[in-house]
Amino acid sequence: MTANEVLAPDSGSAAMTMFLPQSPFVQQLGIELVDIDEGTARLRLPYRDELSTVGQMLHGGVIAGCIDIGIMTAAWAGSEVPEKLRGVTVSMSVQFMEPVYAEGVDIVGTRIHAGRSLKTCRVDIVGTESGRLVATGTGTYKVG
């Protein structure tokens, strides 16, 4: 294989396993892929002071970014790989339940509907140590 050849993933799950560690935004946040399966994905964001606002409260924009990444990952999880390896969030809604202080979060994404290219997903953001529901979101993602 030459340096110009790219390994093509054989599934949407494999695509996410390859993509997430290469994404500068995912790297900047520090999000880790924990598990990915047919229509479900679990990721984790360890707490860092740089991601917080006043009083070590995790910033709402960070939580919204986690929801977006959870939607994307759940949409690809178990999907067939399209001819063009691309995707985009079409819409997203976020509901904040309560703040989380000095604690990482688990990002739990589930695909709840799958059309040919549009996938609708739900994501729960849960405190890693407390187990408390911090936020939830839904969104539609276009695969391909």
Image: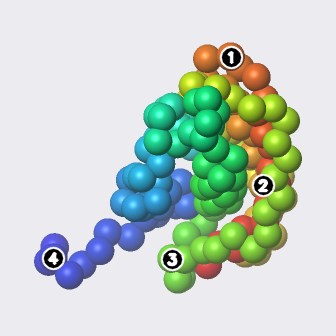
Which kind of residue does numbered mark 2 sit on? Answer: Cys
First in sequence: mark 2 vs mark 4: 4
Name which of mark 2 and mark 1 comes first in the sequence. 2
* Pointer 3 local density, CA inside 10 Å: few below 14, some 14–19, many at least 20: few
Report helix, strand or loop for mark 2.
Answer: strand
Q: Which mark is residue 130?
A: 1
What kind of element bears circle 4? loop
- Check disc 3 and give the amino acid type: Leu
* The quadrant where residue 108 appears: top right
Q: CA distance from mark 2 to mark 1?
A: 24 Å
Residue at x-position 40% and y-position 52%? 27
Q: Is residue 135 visible?
A: yes
Query: Residue type at mark 1?
Result: Ser
Q: Secondary structure at mark 1?
A: loop
- Between 66 and 48, the one lying in front of the other is 48
Q: Which residue is mark 2?
A: 121
The first of marks 3 and 1 along the sequence is 3
Picture layout, residue 52 above or below residue 18: above
Q: Is residue 84 left or right of residue 108?
A: left
Residue plotted at (64% across, 74% down): 88
- Relative height, residue 65 to residue 34 (above, below): below
Mark 3 sits on what residue?
A: 85
- Residue at horizontal 61 percent and vertical 78 percent from the top: 144
Q: Is residue 124 above or below residue 126?
A: below
**Residue 3 image label:** 4
Residue 131, given in percent of the width and then of the height, sits at 71, 20
